[in-house]
Image: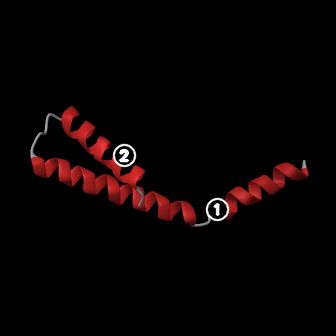
Amino acid sequence: MDTADKLAAAIFAAAKCSAMSDHEPNSYLDRYDEFIRLMKERKEASKKPMEIPDEFLEKLKKKRRR
């Protein structure tokens, strides 16, 4: 997690708390932790190969045959 990711999480946390009129200090920290967790999950998911359902592949093969 680099500095830009941490800064983005802090900005998103402040914006979300402001939009919800939730100005408790712990709310900001909770939202920050939430955005950091989501960013880590997104990066991990982007490293995994995408699984393509067999039904889709079969339909694609049929279209190519036409």
Q: Quadrant of residue 40?
A: bottom left
Instruction: Give coordinates of residue 45: x percent, y percent.
Output: 50, 62
Give the vertical position of 21 relative to 2 (above or below). Answer: above
Viewer-side residue, 39 vs 60: 39
Residue that protrudes farthest toward the right in the picture:
66
Figure colour scheme: secondary structure
Residue drawn at x 9%, y 45% is: 24
| Residue 53 - label | 1
Amino acid type, residue under disc 2 in the picture: Ala
Viewer-side residue, 65 vs 38: 38
Q: CA distance from mark 1 to mark 2?
A: 34 Å
Instruction: Give coordinates of residue 13: x percent, y percent.
Output: 26, 44
Viewer-side residue, 63 vs 40: 40
Residue drawn at x 82%, y 56% is: 61
Residue drawn at x 86%, y 51% is: 64
In this picture, residue 34 sits left or right of residue 28: right
Tell which circle, 1 or 2, labels the residue nearer the N-terminal end. 2
Q: Nearer the viewer, mark 1 or mark 2?
A: 2
Amino acid type, residue under disc 1 in the picture: Pro
